[in-house]
Image: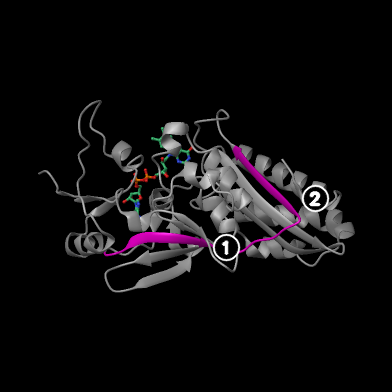
Amino acid sequence: MVEKCYIPSSLEEALKIRRETGARPLAGGSDLMVQYKQGIGITPAFPFPVMIISKLEELRGIRQKDDGSVEIMALATPDEISQCPFMPWHVKNAASRMGAIALRNTATIGGNIGNASPKGDLPQPLILLDAEIVLRNCDEERIMPLDEFILGSKKTALRDDEIIYKIIIPPVSYSYAYYRKIGTRKANAISKLSLSSLITIEEGVITDFRAASGAAGPKVIRSRESENILKGKRIDEVQDVLPSFLDSWNDAISPHAMPQYRRNTTRRMLEHFILTAAGMPENQIIE
Ligand SMILES: Cc1cc2nc3c(=O)[nH]c(=O)nc-3n(C[C@H](O)[C@H](O)[C@H](O)COP(=O)(O)OP(=O)(O)OC[C@H]3O[C@@H](n4cnc5c(N)ncnc54)[C@H](O)[C@@H]3O)c2cc1C
């Protein structure tokens, strides 16, 4: 049986179709078209109705609010995100490393989150920055932490009548920032492992520390318990507490494939970042 394909011309119409038919949104199609492909030159066979949302103007754009937060609409592409002058550094970096240029102009942030792959590049820095996701149905908006929206590999809290509307990144400040994606090659590679981190040091004390590991478990890993081991410590105490922090992070991640490689590499990246930050002048990007 051939399932239906809808092409709504407004967000209102799209939400109505979604409620009445449960049609799945297709944005850039770079995950869906591949997942349901039948063969070269043959139209994909979707076992469910789909709704092409790529023309919906209401889902386009990136804005900075007066409080410094950044709103990224669901159809923003990695290219738009990486070119945006006010985009937080970690997210800009991750977007610029996604796929090749053609993909960076077709894929969308809504699709990257909706696909909920543990290897997806954008959820990792967004979760580091405590981003929230805004979902919409015909009647209302629902907002929740992105970390809670992504439940596991390919699982999200999206309801049958909802679509992803936008992402909100709260204002962020730090003394040092770190981002690393490890793929098979520098460009056009799915992440084997990725890590974002940030640290704020005020008068010799770590007042904020966060890290987010990608491709090291069924979803992006943030361990607040591990982060708290470093928070409040003076930088001259870092050497002493580092082993317990690294052990705690190692317990938090659960890499499936090549676990030893992923564990060792994550440990080395964190160690390098924290020790370098603890001994360097402020406001530097550590690469
Ligand atoms: C060659 C190639 C290279 C790739 N390289 C990378 C890479 O380096 N890094 C990376 O992270 N990914 C990569 N991907 C995966 C993919 O491109 C990304 O996940 C992309 O962001 C998906 O966006 P999309 O708009 O194309 O999603 P789609 O395929 O349109 O949708 C993906 C999922 O999200 C849902 N969805 C989409 N939009 C919404 C919405 N607004 N509301 C609710 N649900 C929605 C869909 O229903 C579907 O379940 C690659 C894919 C290919 C084919």
Q: Say whether residue 119 is visible.
A: no
Q: Amino acid at mark 1?
A: Asp
Q: Residue at x 58, y 49 (%)?
A: 85
Q: Amino acid at mark 2?
A: Ala
Q: Where residue 212 is drawn, which disc sits there? A: none
Q: Say whether residue 182 is visible.
A: yes
Q: Please name the colour scheme applied to the rendered image.
A: one colour
- Residue 59 lies left or right of residue 168; in this view the side is left
Q: Where residue 130 is drawn, which disc sits there? A: 1
Q: Residue at x 41, y 47 (%)?
A: 108
Q: Residues within 10 Å of mark 1 (few under 14, many from 20)?
A: some
**Quarter of the view holding residue 161:** bottom left
Q: Residue at x 37, y 71 (%)?
A: 141
| Quadrant of ligand 1 in image | top left
Q: Position of residue 210 (x, y in %)?
A: 67, 58
Q: Is mark 1 within 8 Å of ligand 1?
A: no
Q: Quadrant of the N terminus?
A: top left
**Quarter of the view holding residue 263:** top right
Nearer the observer, 225 or 136: 136
Q: Is residue 105 above or below residue 212?
A: above
**Which residues are drawn in magenta?**
161-181
